Amino acid sequence: MNRQALGTTDMAPSPLAPPRDASAATPPQRILVVEDERIVALDISARLKKLGYAVAGLATSGEAALDICRETPPSLVLMDIFLDSGMDGIEAARRIRELHDIPVVYITSHDDQLTLRRAAKTAPYGYVIKPVDERWLQSAIEVALYKHATEIDLKRSEDRFRRLFERMLNAFVLFEAICDGTGEVEDLRLLEVNPAFERVTGLPRGEVEGRRIREVFPGVEPFWIETLGQVAATRVSTRFENYLADLNQYFLVEAYSPGPGQVAAIIEDVTDLRRGEQLLRHRTFHDPLTDLPNRSLCLDRLHRAIERAKRRLNYVYALIFLDLDRFKLINDSLGHLAGDKVLCRVAALLRRHVRRLDTVARVGGDEFAILLEEIASPGDALRVARKIRDSLTEAMTIDGQKLYLSAGMGIVLGPADYERPEELLQNATIAMNHARRSGVGRIKVFDWVMREVAEHDMGVETGLRRSLEEKQFILYYQPIYSLSDRSLVGFEALVRRQRPDGGLDLPGEFIHIAEETGLIIPLGNLVMAEACAALGRWSMDMAASTKFSISVNLSGKQFSQPDLVKQTVKSLRDTGADPRRLRLEITESVLMDNPESALAKLRGLREMGITIGIDDFGTGYSSLSYLQRFPIDCLKVDRGFVSDMDDHGNRVIVKTVVNLAHSLGLEVVAEGIETPRQEALLKEFGCDFGQGFLFSRPLPHDKASAFLRSPAT
């Protein structure tokens, strides 16, 4: 089941939740389990006890749950949404919240939208998906308990807040978030202001309450709405300082969320303290998060270095451009606040490795530039880069999580014939990109061949965009045979690009550029739609019992798209193709990038009847546990093993893969079969299917259609 459908996110157990210690004086939290399937209830009860909780009771109906909550209120209720007798779990949860203010976490194995919308109206504290996973169970309970405790504290402070409200010296505003159709905060409504607000802004309370902030302050910067809106959405407090153009004043704002969809802001007028030229200049030329020089100041320092090199023969400098590897994964898994902490730690680390006369700047999201001046030789730059690389590999603890970072680095050595600092920074970026292509944590020194490669890649990207617009991509189909009787069982769809001269470009000439630029997404959608269209046309000429399918490869970026299942459904419906005849192939590494999300997507695809294959098996992730965890139907043996089966080690690997797959009830496809000996060995090993030049090269659509209709097939 898709966890996103239930509003959950990938998370480790909350670092804010108190650790459970059996020897501690605090009694364990009491959990009431409401579940009408006794076996499931007993299983959950056992898991709760194992995790250190006390079970307050087992209820099989909503009425029984209400009675227990009234007589001996538990700390939290685990509520099955669907209960067979009497009121269902959603109604019981609503009453428990209204009558007893006890947090409720739903247990469910269903994801129909009507039920989820009903459940959402009860403001649950979380969801746990059946079958219950202990890690997720503990995470959901601890988050819910912490959230509920926080809400209780807020309620207790509400009365005190009301008494202080009218007497505050600083302005106070209570906002309500206004969201667009996608749920993003687009504006804020002023619900209530205090007398100090009138004094600071000169605006009467009666003229601002109930109006939108864009109406009250037409020149308000998007930063205000984005920052305050994030507090309302995430319930995470923040503190910031910003300029309000309508009043020509600077304000220091402390914001927190007193309730869902609301944000309260305490606003202090700090205009007099911020009028100095020094602070304004610092704000203009420094990154607000890391306090490092920003891109503008970095370019200014580079310009000065270029000018010094022209005047002084002995002046040597170097520029290091650094980009953190897989930083997006940190933001996605731990959150942007943790990501910001990582950037600050990296900034501090970089400062430690340079001298006072050098410049460390943040020039992008996770990109840093280091200008080394007055160095003795170019080798000094390489030594600094290696020290930085080694320091990044040391464990970094953020919010209780150990992180191991790496970065690709590009170096430009000066002096050289540069006129513009932008060109110097561009060449360092090009060298960094070459380093990242070479692997994790690599360092490359710029040379002009790299510039030529970058310009070539830019040309390829431009050509790809034009080819997509003009629909110059076509599919070829390579037959897949049953090795037992050489009967045709399907095709693998392979994309080709038509050149203006009539020739064809193979995937190796453009796929890597498509991956890097994100063009693989529209290209992948095009391949899926065309493959489904061909499948729909061919299926009409086949008996329903005929074993025939088309295999389509999914790239990592395509598989990571949240609407993958939706796009696949659309392609099948638009073409009338039978989903049972479609096989989607992904690599092992794609599965393991985000296992929980991958599991949900694969389940969604399997529920439609689509089969799932693992491409290039044996070349990626080393753990085999995912073969049992994920809904997989087929393994495809990588052509590298098949083509070199004269080597004893490769023969053993292929045979082992076939045996492993069959023991797990999976089918095996071998690709790259080119010789009769390879076919004979694969048949001897019991391999189910095969493809390769021995049987047929990939065929254009018309020849593939004729191939299907031929009597031999």
Image (cartoon, helix red, strand yellow):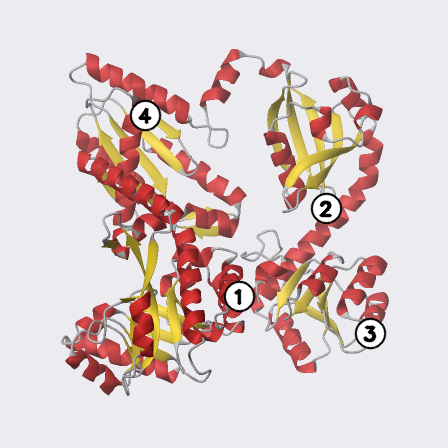
Q: Is residue 683 above or below residue 310?
A: below
**Closer-to-camera residue (277/213):** 213
Q: Residues within 10 Å of mark 2 (few under 14, many from 20)?
A: some
* Percent coordinates x, y for residue 100 in the rendering: 83, 60
Which circle's residue, 4 or 3, is located before the other in the chain? 3
Label of residue 64 in the image: 3
The local secondary structure at tag 2 comes to loop
Q: Which residue is mark 2?
A: 260
Disc 1 residue type?
Answer: Arg
Q: Which of pointers 1 and 4 indicates the residue nearer the eye?
A: 1
Q: Amino acid at mark 3?
A: Ala
Q: Quadrant of the C terminus?
A: bottom left
- Gap between marks 2 and 4 measured at Cα: 46 Å
Whole-percent x, y for residue 549 in the image: 40, 75
* Residue that carries the numbered disc 4 in the rendered image: 422
Q: Quadrant of the image for the N terminus?
A: bottom right
In the figure, is residue 672 to the left or right of 144? Answer: left
Label whose residue precedes the other's in the sequence (2 or 1): 2
Q: Amino acid at mark 2?
A: Pro
The mark that comes first in sequence, 1 or 3, is 3
- Whole-number angstrom distance, CA of label 1 to CA of label 4: 50 Å
With respect to residue 298, does 684 lie above or below?
Answer: below
Q: How far is mark 2 from mark 1, CA to CA?
A: 39 Å
Quick check: can you spot residue 670?
yes
Residue at left 60%, top 25%?
242
- Using a 10 Å C-alpha cutoff, classify the residue at mark 1 as few (fewer than 14 neighbours), some (14 to 19) or many (20 or more): some
Q: CA distance from mark 2 to mark 3?
A: 30 Å
Q: In terms of sequence position, does the residue under pointer 1 or pointer 4 come before the other?
A: 4
Q: Amino acid at mark 4?
A: Glu
Whether pointer 1 and pointer 4 mark residues with C-beta atoms closer than 8 Å, the reply is: no
